[in-house]
């Protein structure tokens, strides 16, 4: 059951200028969130060292990941019910206020808390941006807007480490500026959003699915903590098993609640839609395999190249180039033909080929070869990720765009969380054993270089140590990482099967707001709607008795 819009305001005219203004506001919000991630990641060793949180450094990442994943379905559903403009501004405000709190944190515990609040805002910025693009741009044209977004994330991967390194390397600034920088940026983004986001407001009298939110939050929290505790204390530890039990119980409770809710956070009817199910499962499988590889590579690259974290962003340039190239080229083809399934198949196949190639990684692999691997990985990512979201959005009615977008992203994050945890455990267990052997085999040189334990390794010390110790350490990383990629190949094989099973539905010619009657494409259409209608032009759409309409708003022609 969908909450009907009750506002009597006339439809918005989606001129090209208005679309561009709205898109600029979305880009500004996403840039702020993406830059923050890379800036804070670079400054993190300094932050935790000064606040005494080295032993609990992972909580900085876990708090943000947990909060972001938690709020994805909530932002998606609430946006469908009440409109997305206010929610987007609230997300910006939360992110900015949390940045002030983080900068003023007196100890590590408060920093983790404010980092979690930042995640509550960051999750909304990402989900609402994708949903708003679907609201204002027809599915057939949507892919071309992914190019600037891909370039934005590539820019953040390069600029973020440089900015984070600059703040931490200058005593007059300090790590606090990794968060203070968000305040003027957030104020500017809020101003842009306030004036540029001209989107309809809605009202809904349907009760909020509080029980569903609580159960989903419990399930998500249990999942994230299970992967964190399992990777640290062992998957068979009583803490991990207790969290696994909590995950199962809360997930079952969530499904039972959603089946009875008047307006569920994640409607179970979505999972009766085979196209949506396949697209979401495909995104989850790719997230599980793809993001695991991305998470493991930076540390190896820093060890192998001797570059600092501040400069390591330059090594991500080939992947960024691959993403932008394939996003732009595939967008042109999709706009011309309306065909997108071929790119999901090709994307998974390219990622799988890159993964097999990365199993050959060795200590003496040149940076040029690694760059080529990253380019291939980025090319595959650019082919598939935006098309998986496109397929999910196109498979549901316009009234469920936000819910479909957030649910698809939620399960992709779940896949990424599981992948990084499980395969991270495999990598670190191999690495600890291989590094111990490398240091024992070069004990005298290790002592002279001040490297007495694998836990104290930093890229600069490894680079300064010289051969043969440096080569032994780099080989230990390569020999630990390369076999892990073989474990990811079967998962990508499953993803390839899902890509072939994905049903290609003709792309909608109308933006979501147009399909819902909240907008028109031109002043002429608005004038025609305002003109008195003849009685014989009125069409009554009968309800079939179960709350479902026989008409599909995505297939209906625009009425002028």
Image: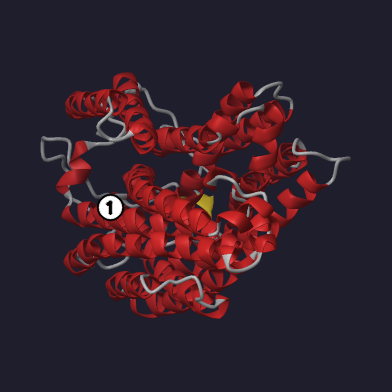
Name the residue rendered at 70%, 24% in the picture. Answer: 105
Tell me the residue that label 1 is attached to: 280
Kind of element beneath mark 1:
helix
Q: Nearer the viewer, residue 278 or 232?
A: 232
x, y percentage for residue 314? 64, 67
Name the residue rendered at 31%, 75% in the picture. Answer: 346
x, y percentage for residue 408? 33, 48
Q: Residues within 10 Å of mark 1 (few under 14, many from 20)?
A: many
Q: Residue furthest front?
A: 444
Is residue 544 toward the left or the right of residue 393 in the image?
left
Q: Residue furthest left?
A: 545
Name the residue rendered at 44%, 34% in the picture. Answer: 66
* Location of the C terminus (image quadrant): bottom left
x, y percentage for residue 263? 28, 29
Q: Is residue 393 visible to us here?
A: no
Count of numbered tags: 1
Determine the image quadrant of residue 337.
bottom left
Is residue 58 toward the left or the right of residue 193 in the image?
left
Q: Nearer the viewer, residue 553 or 467?
A: 467
x, y percentage for residue 191? 72, 41
Which color mode does the image show? secondary structure
* Location of the N terminus (image quadrant): top left
Is residue 456 toward the left or the right of residue 81 in the image?
right
Name the residue rendered at 51%, 64% in the picture. Answer: 472
Q: Is residue 113 visible to us here?
A: yes
Q: Is residue 386 above or below residue 184?
A: below
Q: Is residue 302 above or below residue 173?
A: below
């Amino acid at each position: 059951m969908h909450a009907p819009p009750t506002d009597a305001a006339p439809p918005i005219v989606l001129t090209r200028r208005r679309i561009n203004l709205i898109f600029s506001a979305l880009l500004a919000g996403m840039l702020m969130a993406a830059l923050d991630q890379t800036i804070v990641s670079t400054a993190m060793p300094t932050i935790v060292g000064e606040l005494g949180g080295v032993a609990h450094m992972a909580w900085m990442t876990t708090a943000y990941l947990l909060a972001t994943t938690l709020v994805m379905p909530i932002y998606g559903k609430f946006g469908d019910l009440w409109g997305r403009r206010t929610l987007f501004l609230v997300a910006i405000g939360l992110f900015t206020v949390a940045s002030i709190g983080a900068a003023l944190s007196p100890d590590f515990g408060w920093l983790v808390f404010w980092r979690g609040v930042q995640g509550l805002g960051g999750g909304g910025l990402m989900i609402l941006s994708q949903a708003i693009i679907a609201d204002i741009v027809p599915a057939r044209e949507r892919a071309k807007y992914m190019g600037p977004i891909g370039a934005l994330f590539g820019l953040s991967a390069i600029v973020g480490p440089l900015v984070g390194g600059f703040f931490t390397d200058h005593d007059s600034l300090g790590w606090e500026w990794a968060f203070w920088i968000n305040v003027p940026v957030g104020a500017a983004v809020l101003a842009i959003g306030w004036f540029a986001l001209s989107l309809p407001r809605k009202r809904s009298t349907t009760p909020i699915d509080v029980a569903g939110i609580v159960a989903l939050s419990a399930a998500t929290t249990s999942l994230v903590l299970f992967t964190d505790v399992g990777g640290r204390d062992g998957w068979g530890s009583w803490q991990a098993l207790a969290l696994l039990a909590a995950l199962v119980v809360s997930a079952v409770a969530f499904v039972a609640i959603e089946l009875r809710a008047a307006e569920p956070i994640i409607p179970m009817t979505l999972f009766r839609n085979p196209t949506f199910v396949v697209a979401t499962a495909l995104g989850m499988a790719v997230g599980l395999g793809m993001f695991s590889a991305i998470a493991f590579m930076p540390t190896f690259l820093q060890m192998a190249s001797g570059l600092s974290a501040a400069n390591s962003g330059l090594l991500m340039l080939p992947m960024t180039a691959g993403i932008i190239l394939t996003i732009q080229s595939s967008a042109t083809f999709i706009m011309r033909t309306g065909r997108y399934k071929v790119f999901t198949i090709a994307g998974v196949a390219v990622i799988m080929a890159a993964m097999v190639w990365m199993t050959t990684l060795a200590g003496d692999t040149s940076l040029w070869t690694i760059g080529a691997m990253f380019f291939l990985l980025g090319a595959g990512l650019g082919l598939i990720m935006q098309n998986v979201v496109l397929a999910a959005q196109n498979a549901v009615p316009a009234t469920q765009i936000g819910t479909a977008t957030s649910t698809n992203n939620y399960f992709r994050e779940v896949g990424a969380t599981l992948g990084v945890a499980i395969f991270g455990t495999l990598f670190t267990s191999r690495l600890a054993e291989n590094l111990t052997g490398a240091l024992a085999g070069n004990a005298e040189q290790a002592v002279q270089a001040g490297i007495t334990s694998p836990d104290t390794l930093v890229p600069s010390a490894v680079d300064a140590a010289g051969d043969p110790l440096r080569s032994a350490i780099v080989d230990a990383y390569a020999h630990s990482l390369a076999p892990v990629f073989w474990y990811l190949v079967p998962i990508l094989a499953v993803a390839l099967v899902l890509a072939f099973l994905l049903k290609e539905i003709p792309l909608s010619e109308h933006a979501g707001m147009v399909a819902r009657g909240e907008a028109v494409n031109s002043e002429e259409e608005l004038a025609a709607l305002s003109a008195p209608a003849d009685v014989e032009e009125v069409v009554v759409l009968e309800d079939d008795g179960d709350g479902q309409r026989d008409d599909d708003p995505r297939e209906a022609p625009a009425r002028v």
